[in-house]
Image: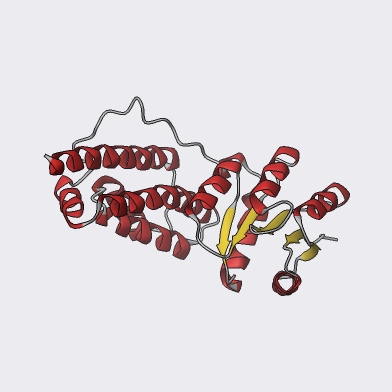
Amino acid sequence: MHLKPTILVVDDDPVAVSLLTKLVEKLEYNVLSAGDGRMALEMLDQNSIDLVIADYDMPRMNGLELLAVVKEKFPRLPFILITAYSKLTVVREAWNLGAFDFFQKPVFVDRLHQTIRLAIEYGHLSIARRAFASTESYSPDPDILNTGVIRELAAALEREDLLRIVEEFETYARIELEHMFRYSMIKDAEQVRVYAHRLKGTATNLGMIKIASHMAQIEAAPDAAITNMGELAIELESSIHWLKQNLTQIFQDLRV
């Protein structure tokens, strides 16, 4: 007899727990619930859990603190964080701690279903947590950026606004690149196309022409296996690094 995976839902709001529990049960998973992080840790010690879905904003122990402890005690257990607001610092810290994915309220059933399936099937694999290499040894590629687009952006936008946009892209692009690779693994071509299209669009708007070109190729053939994930990750890191370098120089020139 095949046992259904068990998912632990953690939230201090009983209505939110009830709603998410019903949604997950409707997807035919077993569900356990906890009202806070400490209770969740007790349940993890007492039960076999396949996935944790936890709210960020909880008393005594918030979702990030719970994530840190879970990854220390159960490093291969996938963890999904739910936030009421899209806080860049929270997303970045959760990603660095090892979160599998993030939901912003309200949680939609279709995405919930897809993400739970991916987390349970692939969340324990080391390939789901790819480290990005240091950019210190990179040499600038003359074809990596469209400097004309970057200069136009720098002239049109306030420095703080533009740098904040780049910072947001840096965080979410890494996450979306990994999601795209996961969907490629399970041969979900439509999701691969969606992520490639989104990355291509933003990269183009920021003048990152080389990464945009690669995303365009993936978008055109989303059913083809992605075999160069490591190269794409390095290329993304390199593109962001040199974009920041170019912006620093451009803003210095604009002040002269």
Near-viewer residue (128 or 60): 60
Q: Is residue 18 above or below residue 142?
A: below
Q: Is residue 126 visible?
A: yes
Q: Residue at x 16, y 53 (%)?
A: 155
Left or right of 215 in this view: 253? left
- Residue lying furthest right in this view? 46
Q: Residue at x 35, y 39 (%)?
A: 235
Left or right of 220 in this view: 247? left
Q: Is residue 245 above or below residue 118?
A: above
Residue 26: image location, x then y, percent: 72, 74
Asked where in the image residue 58 lies, by quadrant, the reply is: bottom right
Question: How many badges with numbers are in the image?
Answer: 0
Residue 134: image location, x then y, percent: 41, 30
Q: Is residue 225 visible?
A: no
Way the structure is coloured: secondary structure
Near-viewer residue (183 or 227): 183
Residue 76: image location, x then y, percent: 69, 42
Q: Residue at x 18, y 57 (%)?
A: 156
Near-viewer residue (1 or 229): 229
- Residue lying furthest left in this view? 256
Q: Quadrant of the N terminus?
A: bottom right
Q: Quadrant of the C terminus?
A: top left
Residue 12: image location, x then y, percent: 74, 64
- Residue lying furthest top in this view? 137
Q: Residue at x 71, y 74 (%)?
A: 19
Left or right of 122 in this view: 29? right
